[in-house]
Image: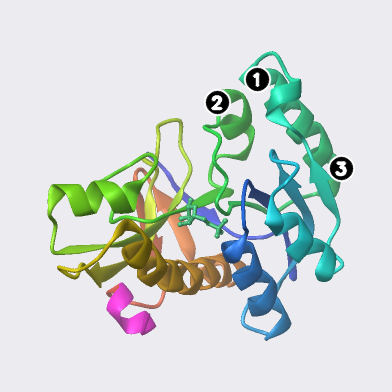
């Protein structure tokens, strides 16, 4: 399979961020852009949930928002067509799923494959799906963490970009572990987007090559 270099058409990169809830990963991106860590603009924030607090965060940052409530559509594909039609004129370089809780179908993924990233609160392929932190606690792992990856047609199965390990404490609850992992999600999210902006990501089948390093240890995450 050929290698595909993943990069924005030009800088600053144009991002669309999809959310469903409180939006702390969205906030990390907003803060990263403001702080000069990420050479991008957020062109739109789209939520499937009209009550998502992340919408407030976007409004505070003067970012355009759009609610496309999945409950108003009879099929998953119709809901995605509505999102695609909002995205189409915006010339988006990268779609970021930031706490977005809907599974995407091939209808959405195919036209944007290689330009959709997700953040997952576990070390994939361990503990895909929802409540990953709870799954980790119940399994009894000593180390969990978080992962950014390109989105493919599976559930949390796409090519992995960055990962960060987080020790599980014996007194952890789902809440305490989630909070500790969340801090690193924000770090990985910003770093992943900046690597994209720098044109340092190449898709090689199901592997991602990051230019300029031998190991992600060198990124100092
Ligand atoms: C995060 O743990 C994210 O990994 C998961 O949803 C949680 C909430 O994210 N997908 P956010 O605070 O809404 O960004």
Does the residue tagged 1 have its C-beta within 8 Å of any atom of ligand 1?
no
Tell me the quarter of the image containing the N terminus. Answer: top left
The residue tagged 2 is 105
Judged from the image, the secondary structure of the residue bearing numbered disc 3 is helix
- Residue 204, relative to residue 176: is it above or below? above
Judged from the image, the secondary structure of the residue bearing numbered disc 1 is helix
Q: Residues within 10 Å of mark 3 (few under 14, many from 20)?
A: few
Question: Which contiguous range is marked in magenta?
Answer: 216-221
Q: CA distance from mark 2 to mark 3?
A: 21 Å
Which label was assigned to residue 77?
A: 1
Asked if residue 95 is among those painted magenta in the image, a careful observer would answer no
Report if residue 124 is visible in the image.
no
Asked if residue 220 is among those painted magenta in the image, a careful observer would answer yes
- Residue 6, relative to residue 61: is it above or below? above
The residue tagged 3 is 89
Taking 173 as reference, is 150 left or right?
right
First in sequence, mark 3 or 1: give its number: 1
| Residue at screen point 80% across, 49% down | 91
């Amino acid at each position: 399979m050929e290698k595909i270099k993943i990069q924005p058409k030009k800088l600053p990169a144009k991002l669309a961020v999809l959310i469903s809830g409180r939006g702390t990963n969205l906030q990390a991106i907003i803060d990263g852009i403001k702080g000069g860590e990420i050479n991008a603009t957020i062109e739109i924030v789209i939520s499937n949930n009209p009550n998502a607090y992340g919408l407030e965060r976007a409004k505070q940052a003067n970012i355009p928002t759009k609610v496309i409530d999945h409950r108003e559509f009879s099929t998953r594909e119709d809901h995605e067509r509505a999102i695609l039609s909002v995205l189409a004129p915006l010339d988006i370089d990268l779609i970021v799923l930031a706490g977005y809780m809907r599974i995407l179908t091939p209808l959405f993924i195919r036209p944007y494959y290689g330009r959709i990233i997700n953040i997952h609160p576990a070390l994939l392929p361990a503990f895909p799906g929802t409540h990953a932190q709870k799954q980790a606690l119940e399994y009894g792992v000593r180390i969990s963490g978080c992962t950014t990856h390109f989105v493919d047609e599976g559930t949390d199965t796409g090519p992995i970009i960055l990962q960060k390990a987080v020790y599980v404490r014996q007194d952890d609850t789902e809440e305490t572990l989630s909070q500790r992992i969340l801090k690193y999600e924000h770090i990985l999210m910003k770093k992943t987007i900046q690597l994209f902006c720098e044109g340092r990501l190449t898709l090689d089948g199901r592997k991602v090559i990051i230019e300029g390093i031998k190991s992600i240890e060198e990124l100092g995450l």
